[in-house]
Image: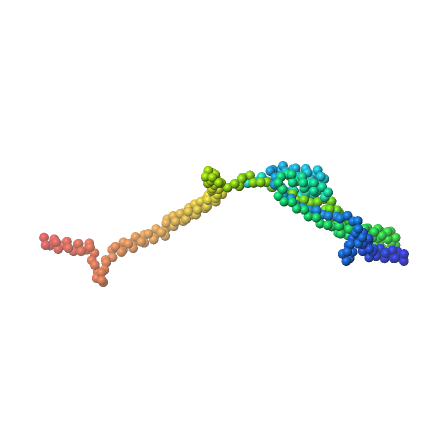
């Protein structure tokens, strides 16, 4: 590398050292956090908010809210709708991006959809972050241009490799900063509003204050009880049927086991042995206090000859 190329390359490497001075010239915060040359700068503010409105029909009001948003140049970034259920007509939640200059007018139009429940907005000043990004992008642009100019004058391979590595690194950082700047610009230009549309309950919540009202409320409660009981029965019926089937199968298995046990040869032999034991016990003379008691049949036979002899 020649002396001229070497000095130019050193100047390219020194671009990062001149970065802070460029930042200060553009009005970005310096190293100590103070503002430099910030007179006349326009504030950049990111506005976000949320809003809840009670409406008669969430479906119709959702379509109207989308129409209002698109009429002022906005867009819908998110949409969630919930179907009607017992006691209400459903609800919906919209994430809307509305031009910052049209946000106030849009809020006034959304209030006309129904009854306003709550609304809140928050503003975040990002002027310093935006100016800092602009300064960094300007400095890196100049650095990349200078390195590209050096690349055309490089005469050896080592210098080419060093320059290409430096250019690749600076360009990657530059694209990242430009992406952040585009995000800030979009957030500043388009405010984010979360709009929730809810419905009132269909059934009135008035307490009964007369006998007839109380009677009607009691009758309605009784019907509701039996309706709930039928629902519970419907839920439990499949389980009861399943349990009955299982109990029937268990009963049949136990019954078959008992029958098979009664009809087995060992049971018959046991019954015969029991019968034989009973017969033997009947033929065995009884004893009382160690003296054999004669059998009644033998006593009868002994008495009979005596009666004959007497005759």
Residue extending farthest to the bottom is 290
Figure check: 249 above or below 4: above
**Residue 177 in view of the camera:** no
Give the residue displayed 55% in from the left and 39% down from the top: 202
Q: How is the image coloured?
A: rainbow
Observer-nearest residue: 251 or 105? 105
Observer-nearest residue: 142 or 214? 214
- Residue 223 coordinates in the image, percent (x, y): 47, 39
Left or right of 271: which side holds 294? left
- Residue 301 coordinates in the image, percent (x, y): 17, 54
**Residue 25 in view of the camera:** yes
- Residue 183 coordinates in the image, percent (x, y): 73, 47
Give the residue displayed 58% in from the left and 40% down from the top: 200
Left or right of 65: which side holds 311? left
Task: Name the quadrant of the N terminus.
Answer: bottom right
Observer-nearest residue: 105 or 21? 105
Figure check: 35 above or below 194: below
Residue extending farthest to the left is 311
- Residue 38 coordinates in the image, percent (x, y): 79, 52
Observer-nearest residue: 122 or 248? 122
Left or right of 130: which side holds 272? left
Instruction: State the image quarter where residue 119 is shown.
Output: top right
Figure check: 215 above or below 152: above
Q: How many marks?
A: 0
Give the residue displayed 43% in from the left and 45% down from the top: 248
Left or right of 241: which side holds 67? right
């Amino acid at each position: 590398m020649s002396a001229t190329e070497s000095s130019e390359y050193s100047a390219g490497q020194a671009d990062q050292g001149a970065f802070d001075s460029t930042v200060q010239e553009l009005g970005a915060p310096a190293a100590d956090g103070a503002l430099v040359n910030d007179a006349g700068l326009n504030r950049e503010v990111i506005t976000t908010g949320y809003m809840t409105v009670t409406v008669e029909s969430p479906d119709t009001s959702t379509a109207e809210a989308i129409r209002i948003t698109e009429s002022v140049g906005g867009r819908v970034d998110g949409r969630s709708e919930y179907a009607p259920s017992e006691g209400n007509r459903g609800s919906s939640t919209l994430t809307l991006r509305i031009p910052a200059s049209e946000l106030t007018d849009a809020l006034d139009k959304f209030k006309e959809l129904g009854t306003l429940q709550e609304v809140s907005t928050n503003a975040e000043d990002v002027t310093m972050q935006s100016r800092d990004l602009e300064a960094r992008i300007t400095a890196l642009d100049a650095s990349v241009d200078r390195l590209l100019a050096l690349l055309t004058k490089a005469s050896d391979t080592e210098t080419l490799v060093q320059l290409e590595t430096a250019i690749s690194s600076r360009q990657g950082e530059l694209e990242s900063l430009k992406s952040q700047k585009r995000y800030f610009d979009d957030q500043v230009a388009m405010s984010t509003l979360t709009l929730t549309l809810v419905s009132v309950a269909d059934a009135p919540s008035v307490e009964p204050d007369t006998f007839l009202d109380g009677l009607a409320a009691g009758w309605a409660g009784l019907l509701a009880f039996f309706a709930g009981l039928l629902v519970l029965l419907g839920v439990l019926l499949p389980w009861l049927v399943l349990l009955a089937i299982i109990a029937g199968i268990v009963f049949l298995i136990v019954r078959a086991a008992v029958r098979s046990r009664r009809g087995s040869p060992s049971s018959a032999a046991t019954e015969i042995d029991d019968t034989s034991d009973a017969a033997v016990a009947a033929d065995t003379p009884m004893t009382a206090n160690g003296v054999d008691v004669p059998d009644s049949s033998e006593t009868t036979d002994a008495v009979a000859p005596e009666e004959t002899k007497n005759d």
